[in-house]
Image: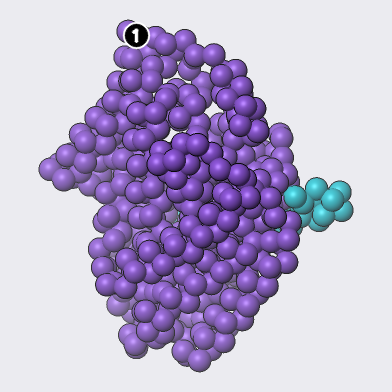
Chain colours: A cyan, B purple
Amino acid sequence: MSFSADFLTILVYFALAAVALGVTLLLALLVRDFKARRLW
Amino acid sequence: MDSRTAILAPNTAWVLLFGFAALWVGLGFCWGRRGKSLDGFMLANRNVGLALGTATAVATWITSNTTMLAPQLALEMGVWGMLSYSTAAIGLLLFAPMAGRIRELMPRGYTSAEFVRLRYGRPAYVVFLFISLIYGLTWLVSMAMAGGLLLEALAGIPYVWGMTVIVAVCVAYTVVGGLHAVIGTDFIQSVIVLIGVVVVSIAVLTRVDLSDIHASLTANRPALLDVAFPAALMGVFNGLLFGLGEIFHSNVWWSRALAMREGVGPKAYALAGLIWLPVPILAGFLGLAAGSLDISVVRPDMVGPLVAAELLGSAGAILVFVVVFASLASSIDSLLAATSDLLVHDLLHGVIRPARRSPTGQRKQIAQAIVGLGVLTWLLCLPQIGTLATVLFFAGPLVGSTVWPIVAGLYWRRANPEAAFWGMIAGSVLGLGCYVFVGWYTGALVGTAVSMVIVILGAQLAPRPFNWDRIRLAESSHA
């Protein structure tokens, strides 16, 4: 039994979206903490 | 210079190295002004917010292995190779509730070893400290050595020069800025790495179709798509346990938990686990794509950079170089800070000279320890022992044996100190024996299992009810 092309496609695009979302989230949190003077 | 793998001209690489070195050290000076006190230098005044807390966990867990080894694993073990590496995120996710518990139990604490001393007493403390220091130094040396080798492979910079610059830069900004510098630069480094991985992946996806990659693998290397690939499945299990041991015991993660503002730790580690989880999958995808792109792979660990350079040209080469440098620095600085804390706070003032010195004295000694550790790392890296990755795996049974003493110590009132001590000793010895005589993939598994049995039996057969307030009281008496 092999991983299908559809599985591979979903896996890679999901990972791409997740990493892009992750870096966006980090930047958004930075802005929020900076505005609230809660960076450190 | 290895002309088969170099993707960047040495002059460009040197300009990038010095540019980033100046940036990190400058930021270290700037942020270091916040860390004049011992708490400020060691723990960033215990006030780190969610953004920086999350980013520092992501950046520290993204080592050069994540960007270089994940594509290699995918190249050699296929889809399971990509997935197996990403299971290391489970360690971060499981550490999330522990970060809250650590902060609750020792709000004025400094290190993981200090917790073991207060919870289990001196014998377990000495064993735990020994394992932590051995592991910290081994990881540090392997990262610095990987740095020298990677800069040589990527840009033809001689190994000794590349390794020296990386170690010197990390030592410089960690000494002047303490944990503020480490955490601040970690944010920038994590953003660089994440954006770099996304950009390269998009470049690959615009060039080749995933169905073509699948068809190419089916025709040429069908084992890489096999759902039941035995070697890869065993690798998943060993990697998972090794990752748990690494995170649960290491002061790198404990010091961050103690540095984060109250209530931030659990959220930051959970978010970091979720953000980190897809990174090895995406990095691994570059390894799978190499076959469809007709890229000649002369060194498996260079497959990711080669794919990036092939698709994005000189811009891709620069991007890869910066990503690799950032991923190395983010781990080396964290190890320098956390290991020097253990050396001064626990080895010097806990074992050798138990009478505590003034906070100002300790702050100065930690700065000196960072420099000393940097010099020691540099000396150990000079001979360029290429097999140090094996030594790092050798530490698997040691760190595996600490998982249960730590978890039981944090949550199980009845956990027995002698059982924790013998669990670490027996787990390490038997785990190392299996590593040597049975196979590398059994080391962490056996170390963890043996320690688990001893810790559970100890708590059941000879329970030693513990009053959690003893930790808080011991801390407040030192404050």
Residue B41 visible in this rendered orientation of the protein: yes
Q: Which residue is mark 1?
A: B462
Measured from the top left, where is residue B9 in percent x and y? Answer: 47, 90
- Image check: B314 left or right of B460? right
Measured from the top left, where is residue B48 in percent x and y? Answer: 71, 47
On-image quarter of the N terminus of chain B: bottom left
**Looking at the image, which is closer to me, B273 or B37?**
B37
- Residue at 32% over, 53% down: B392
> Relative to B307, does residue B249 appear above or below in the rendering?
above
- Residue at 31% over, 44% down: B396
**Looking at the image, which is closer to me, A18 or B383?**
B383
- Image check: B245 left or right of B188? left
- Residue type at numbered disc 1: Ala
- Image check: B123 left or right of B30? left
- Image check: B199 left or right of B5? right
- Residue at 33% over, 20% down: B418
Label 1 secondary element: loop
> Relative to B324, does residue B82 appear above or below in the rendering?
above
